[in-house]
Amino acid sequence: MKEHIEELLNQALLHLIRDGVLNEDCDIEPQLERTRTSEHGEFASNIAMVLAKRAGMPPREIAQLIIDKLPPSRQVKHAEIAGPGFINFYLNHVALTTVVKDILYQGDNYGHRPPNPDHEVTVEFVSANPTGPLHVGHGRGAAYGASLASILAAAGYKVQREYYVNDNGRQMDILAVSVWLRYLELCGEQLRFPDNGYQGDYIYNIAREVRNEIGDKFRFKENDVFDGLPPDESQGGDRENHIDELISRAEELLGHEGYLAFFETSVNSILTDIQKDLAGFGVEFDHWFSEKELEDSGAIAHAIERLEDNGHLYKKDGATWFRASALGDEKDRVVIRENGRTTYFASDIAYFLNKMERGFEKAIYVFGADHHGYIARLRAAATGLGEDPDRLEILLVQFAVLYRAGKKVQMSTRSGEFITLRELREEVGSDAARFFYVMRSHEQHLDFDLDLAKSRSNENPVYYIQYAHARICSVFRNLEQMNETHNEAIGEAALKLLTEPNETRLLRELSRYPEVIESAARLRAPHQLAHYLQALATEFHAYYNSQQFLVDDENIRNVRLNLILAVKIVLANGLELLGISAPEAM
RNA sequence: GCGCCCGUAGCUCAGUAGGAUAGAGCACCAGAUUCCUAAUCUGGGGGUCAGAGGUUCGAAUCCUCUCGGGCGCGCCA
């Protein structure tokens, strides 16, 4: 509908230019927006005001010229000048009601475009290191990324959902050593745990797993493990130094095979847990991309070579640096360390190059807000590789702060005192968690009220929306109990009977859905969909209270059933995109 | 110190490719069910869009400064 009117405007404009009434400069794309109140019709354009200066005419005069040249349309009742020069479009009743027909006909596809292979993007999100269970901070990135990916897909993009598994870094070594030390404890050794190790209880669980498999084969005495190591931070030393040496000691004592056993068991165990956790949260990925494979395949070397060929690398202090400062970053960055190992940043560059080589139009990254320093350096890398930095898009998700009984829930990852995503799901349920995480703009800090998310009351927006869906289902169950059936054809023939104010508002709301999807996709803003669903549910509940659906008159009964069935379909479609269930009964 | 983000009703937030009288939920007050789920609905009060300048027909939205809050500035990941 919106596109139809934009086309009408365009026709009128071209006509005026052709006739020489308006000059060539006036050939611009007309903008159309929804009106705020139906007093102003359905759609309004500010085109006349935008053109006023170029045309050298007062806006209202231009508006009149355009209106006079608008081609006739079966859907537009009339257009009129309003205020300083708006052109308001009023629709015919038929045009308003066709949306019901469209929805019943298109079902799950209503408002969604088929995937266009020319617009293929990757959305990378979560990508938490497999060093422990996901916590509530990851939850928002997961909910946002998953919803965004679904919305982009609904808007016609072909979408790859990717999780970058950092299974190759130093943090993984620290994890493996943490598990080994806990394993030694389980074997009966008494030893101190490094400041920098992973403290959580889950480490014991993995250690137990390893021990069940291989027994005490890798038990060593406390002295053998720690003698000769530099002091840890709490012993007056440097904790990084301490743990690095501890890693080397582990490799010595365990041998390559033994070390690998701890390393791989740890990673696999945690990764499997993360996958289950996300699946339980309704978050699925198309591709779990391993950093290790990236390295083994030579992709990192390939990317570094590309930077070298483009003249962006230099050597200093034994390391290889990327001259990022010449490409908009604050400072230069190391890609190959003095010890010969590539940095994490080098992997990032390689992964980005890999995405480009796989032909994606855009690589979208969902990062926590604390990673905003990465934007400049990744863009610099893109430019350095000779790629278009605009094909790289980084979206930052601000932190979520949990509140319980009105008080902030304190958390600290380091000490292992954090609430896991799993605990959150168990406490408030997956549906409420998914909704609360995306109900606010991603660039806004989120206050997550646990008590509210849990409450089964009128204050909880999730239940409000789901209840609207369940209520509609209930109406159809009652219809069955009355031994009646819903006749869609009769309803369709009676669309002109939808004249109650509540019905008109509902029609308006339903017809907005495709525009909401388009906007939410374009602005990367799933919260717009969340707000829309609330608004649609509000209109439905108001309608429910004002009109009886199951009336004797079969025309009125069936047309109202058509209408609420359309509402049910749109609610279900929208909830699906947000990863929230649409219950039949509550 | 430098850089990025944010500041809208008592609270939590929408609204930013400039548009008409700045919206919603919660909270508060007053009401609604012989009828499809009251997890619902109807009505009401409530604003210096942090502040000050500027750009223009028009600014919550764009520019500059000030104040307030968050985050980032490792051969860490």
Image: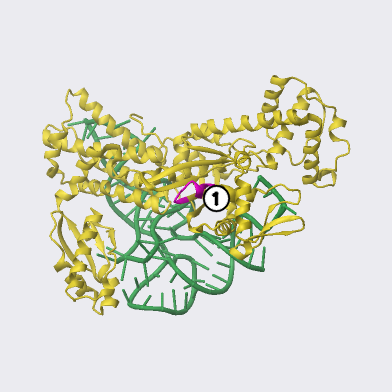
Chain colours: A yellow, B green
A332, A517: nearer the viewer: A332
Identify whether A60 is placed above or below A401: below
Location of residue B77 by image quarter? top right
Image check: A497 left or right of A22?
left
Location of residue A231 by image quarter? top right
Tally of marks:
1
Q: Helix, strand, or loop for circle 1? A: helix
Q: How packed is label 1: few (under 14 Cα within 10 Å), some, or many (20 or more)?
A: many
Residue A464 visible in the displayed image = no
Which residue corresponds to the image point at 14% horizontal and 34% vertical from the top-left?
Answer: A489
Residue B65 screen position, x and y as percent: 56, 74
Q: Which amino acid is tagged 1? A: Leu
Is residue A569 magenta-colored? no
Image check: A435 left or right of A559?
right
* Residues rendered magenta in the picture: A354-362
Residue A316 visible in the displayed image = yes
Which residue corresponds to the image point at 29% horizontal and 64% vertical from the top-left?
Answer: A29
Location of residue A167 by image quarter? top right
A484, A264: nearer the viewer: A264
- Badge 1 is on which residue? A353
Identify whether A374 is placed above or below A461: below
